[in-house]
Image (spheres, helix red, strand yellow):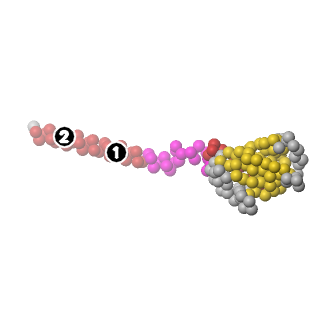
Amino acid sequence: MEGLSRSFGLIIAVCMLVFVIAIGMSMVYHSSEMQQNNEGSIFAKGKSIQEIEKEHYEKEAAFQWAGHSILPNGTVSIQVAYTGPTIDKLNESDIEFLINGRRCTWHGQLAKERGSRVISLHDGETLYILVNFDCALWKGDTLTFVYAPLNLEVSAQV
């Protein structure tokens, strides 16, 4: 009788071990299948890497007006402070200016400090811009700085 109960206990232990191994193998199989199909992935929702990065930047990035002045020759000196993830390549073509809500063509120079050209912009840095506009800018007008790729803007009354 004792031998029979030991055999029965051994059979139950082997069955439980086989059951645990089967469940583990099933989980591994389904996990690898999901990775191959990108199920549960952010890419399965139809978003590209660029769209995901843009959403990330828009949530965290911001410009603040840090100051401006109009020089005697009509050139406008503008300072905007940036907070957020690093912008790796800042192009002049990505920046727009609006005067009283109307887009205005501009020519100018971007710098982070006196004499340095901007390539990237990091959290906490100030962007200095010397601008000449092809439109009239009068005292009391609202001047808006727009960073188009992230649709970030900041305005001030001049």
Majority secondary structure in the magenta region = helix
| Extent of the magenta region | 30-53
Q: Position of residue 41 (x, y in %)?
A: 54, 45
Q: Residue at x 81, y 41 (%)?
A: 157
- Asked whether residue 50 is in view, the answer is no
Above or below 140: residue 91: below
Question: Which quadrant holds the N terminus?
Answer: top left
Q: Is residue 89 left or right of residue 104?
A: left
Residue 103, visible in the rendered structure = yes
**Residue found 75% across the figure and 54% down from its top:** 128
Q: In the rendering, at what x and y percent does residue 114 appear?
A: 74, 59
Q: Is residue 19 magenta?
A: no
Pointer 1: residues within 10 angstroms few (<14), some, or many (20+)?
few
* Residue 31 lies in the magenta-colored region: yes
Percent x, y of residue 89: 68, 57
Q: CA distance from mark 1 to mark 2?
A: 20 Å
* Residue 112, horizontal then vertical, whole percent: 71, 57
For the point 49% across and 49% down, the residue is 35
Instruction: Judge left or right: residue 108 versus residue 49.
Output: right
Query: How many numbered discs sit on the rendered protein?
Result: 2
Query: In the image, which disc is placed on residue 155?
Result: none
Residue drawn at x 44%, y 45% is 30
The label on residue 9 is: 2
Above or below residue 20? Residue 108 is below
In terms of sequence position, does the residue under pointer 1 or pointer 2 come before the other?
Answer: 2
40 relative position to 54: left or right:
left
Q: Amino acid at mark 2?
A: Gly
Q: Quadrant of residue 144?
A: top right
Tell me the SS state at disc 2. Answer: helix
Residue 22: give its label: 1
